[in-house]
Image (cartoon, rainbow, N blue to C red):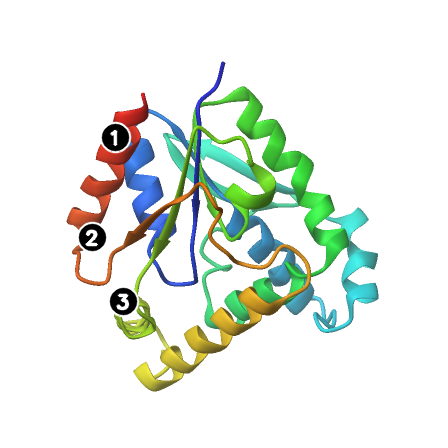
Amino acid sequence: MSINIAIDGPAGAGKSTIARRAAAELGFIYVDTGALYRSVAYHCISNGVDINAPEQVEGILSGITPELRFIDGVQHVFLNGEDVSDRIRTPEVSMGASKVSAIPAVRAFLFDLQKKISRENNIIMDGRDIGTVVLPNADLKIFLTASPEARADRRYRELMGKPDAPSYEQVLADIIKRDRDDSTREIAPLKQAEDAVLCDTTELSLEESVEKIIRMIKEIL
């Protein structure tokens, strides 16, 4: 029987990095559900589909095939057979992912893929509604968070070396807006599951955060 760990939390909390490293340490499969939503948003943005028009987004779903492939233990995101892992990590796609993830048809489209992976593997899956919707019976649920300022600083440092990198102020504004959008949407809003363990990493380094998550998981194994 597979072991399922659910990690939820707001944008920029470090879920993907921490979950990926913890999974590697434990020999689990890491599943970045946000990357699946990003791939849908990327396709829409690249093809002129209005992400604010649910009927337009729903119309393109039958023509796309997002996949998570694990190459040498590292997750890669493929869209219609093309590796888009790097192209989906932009602020524009990030905001677009928040929009498309609020569309019921998109959530239903990706739900079966997420459930299939969880049934077949020992996994750490992160997202916004993993513990509340996708894996309500997960062996361990963690709600990973940090202050908006700490999250903005981390995201800014990730982006500052890239062309057209946004200012810290813009990153912070985007984080605050993303929090508001994710927590107030009607479909699967961001919230802590009643039986989830809160883990605030505001004052923790990345290494300390990874070690804390690994300890929490080992306690239930």
Which residue is drawn at the image coordinates 26% and 26% (left, top)? 218
Viewport quadrant of the C terminus? top left
Q: Secondary structure at mark 3?
A: helix
Q: Tell me the residue that label 3 is attached to.
A: 154
Q: Is residue 207 left or right of residue 109?
A: left
Front in this rendered view, residue 218 or 40: 218
| Residue 218 seen by the camera | yes
> The disc labelled 2 sits on which kind of residue?
Leu
- 1 or 3: tag closer to the N-terminus: 1
Residue 54: image location, x then y, percent: 78, 66
Relative side of 220 to 204, left or right: right
Whether residues under marks 1 and 3 lie with C-beta atoms below 8 angstroms apart, the answer is: no
Tell me which label, 2 or 3, sits earlier in the chain.
3
Q: SS class of the residue under badge 2?
A: helix
Residue 88 or 136: which is nearer the viewer? 136
Numbered tag placed on residue 184 in the rendering: none
Residue 163, image x and y in percent?
36, 76
Residue on which disc 2 sits: 206
Q: Earlier in the sequence, mark 2 or mark 1?
A: 1
Question: Three-letter amino acid code at disc 3?
Answer: Arg
C-alpha span from label 1 to label 3: 23 Å
- Disc 2 crowd rating (10 Å Cα; few below 14, some 14-19, many 20+) is few
Per the image, the residue denoted by label 1 is 25
Q: Is residue 148 above or below residue 83?
A: below
